[in-house]
Image (cartoon, helix red, strand yellow):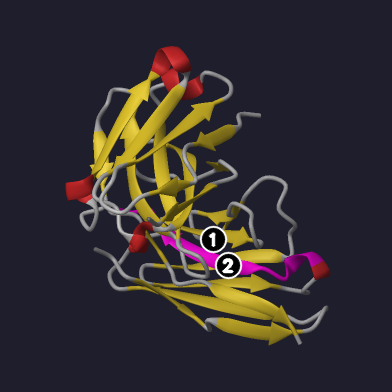
């Protein structure tokens, strides 16, 4: 079964840019059916959808984060990435990547294990 | 944005109990509602999709129901492995939104 694996720095300084990558184990990032999302969870709190990207590069943003977020897809490396700019302590969270099928109408069925990112000087 | 409200936020129960968690949407999401289980330090796991469809491999003691703006997740007989947090999520429209979560604790 496909596996997702997040990677990136565990510590980011305030005002800098957080960059994370998610590797898709089976190359299915090239299949147009799938969409690839980022979800985060601050310590002790609930889940927040950051946004999603299709392998065509089409992005879908959470309006609350849109001004600071960008996505990219590299099908040759079977990975997709998240950049979150101008981070503050409020961006400290576990960041998950996840997969869903179809632009709408399907839940997140495959999740990465998550990577913890702390924002601190 | 569609707001998802879960209740209760915490629930204390014993093994064997029947447990019900409620999720309400601020506007209709039709049947595009999922339930996830999350254990500490782990990723959420999909339990229920399309409000009432059981994900493959999920025990039949988990049951989802509802449509429109009101949904429930019922665990018919709570097992030790079920003590966890549960989240609803609407995927009817962007931005996707989650409920605040329900933590099921041992009584």
| Chain letter of disc 1 in the image | B
Query: Which residue lies at the image location 51% right of the left edge and 71% below the top edge?
Result: B101
**Mark 2 Cα shell of 10 Å, populated few (<14), some (14-19), many (≥20):** many
Residue A21 counted in the magenta span: no
Q: Do the residues labelled 1 and 2 touch (CB within 8 Å)?
A: yes
x, y (%) of residue A10? 49, 46
Residue marked by disc 1: B35
Query: Which residue lies at the image location 50% right of the left edge and 21% below the top edge?
Result: A28
x, y (%) of residue B17? 77, 82
**Quadrant in the picture for residue A84:** top left
The reply, left or right, for residue A38 in relation to residue B63 is: left
In terms of depth relative to the viewer, which is nearer, A39 or B19?
Answer: A39
Residue at disc 2, secondary structure: strand
Confirm whether residue A103 shows in the render.
no
Query: Which residue lies at the image location 45% right of the left edge and 39% below the top edge?
Result: A100
In the rendered image, the residue lying farthest to the front is A121
- Residue A90: give its label: none
Q: Quadrant of the N terminus of chain A?
A: top right
Above/below status of A22 relative to B8 = above
x, y (%) of residue B44? 58, 54
The reply, left or right, for residue A115 in relation to residue B84 is: left
| Chain letter of disc 2 in the image | B
Q: How many marks?
A: 2
**Quadrant in the picture for residue A102:** top left
Residue marked by disc 2: B86
Q: Give the range drawn in magenta.
A: B81-93
- Please tell me whether mark 1 or mark 2 is closer to you in this view: 2
Confirm whether residue A29 shows in the render.
yes
Residue at disc 1, secondary structure: strand
x, y (%) of residue A7? 51, 35
Query: Which residue lies at the image location 28% right of the left edge and 54% below the top edge?
Result: B95
Q: Which of marks 1 and 2 is nearer the N terminus?
A: 1
């Amino acid at each position: 079964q496909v596996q997702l694996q997040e990677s990136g720095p565990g510590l980011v300084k305030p005002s800098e840019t957080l960059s994370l990558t998610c590797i898709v184990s089976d190359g299915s990032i090239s299949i147009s059916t799938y969409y690839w999302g980022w979800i985060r969870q601050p310590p002790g709190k609930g889940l927040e959808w950051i946004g999603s990207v299709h392998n065509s590069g089409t992005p879908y943003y959470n309006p609350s984060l849109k001004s600071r977020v960008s996505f990219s897809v590299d099908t040759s490396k079977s990975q997709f990435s998240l950049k979150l700019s101008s981070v503050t302590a409020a961006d400290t969270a576990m960041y998950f990547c996840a997969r869903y099928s179809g632009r709408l109408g399907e839940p997140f069925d495959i999740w990465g294990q998550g990577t913890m990112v702390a924002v601190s000087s | 944005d569609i707001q998802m409200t879960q209740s209760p936020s915490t629930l204390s129960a014993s093994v064997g109990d029947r447990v019900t968690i409620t999720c309400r949407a601020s506007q209709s999401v039709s049947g595009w509602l999922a339930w996830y289980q999350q254990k500490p330090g782990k990723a959420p796991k999909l339990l229920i999709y399309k409000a009432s469809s059981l994900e493959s491999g999920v025990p039949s003691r988990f049951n989802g129901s509802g449509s429109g703006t009101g949904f429930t997740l019922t665990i018919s007989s709570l097992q030790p492995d079920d003590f966890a947090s549960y989240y609803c999520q609407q995927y009817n429209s962007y931005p996707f939104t989650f409920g605040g979560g329900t933590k099921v604790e041992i009584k």
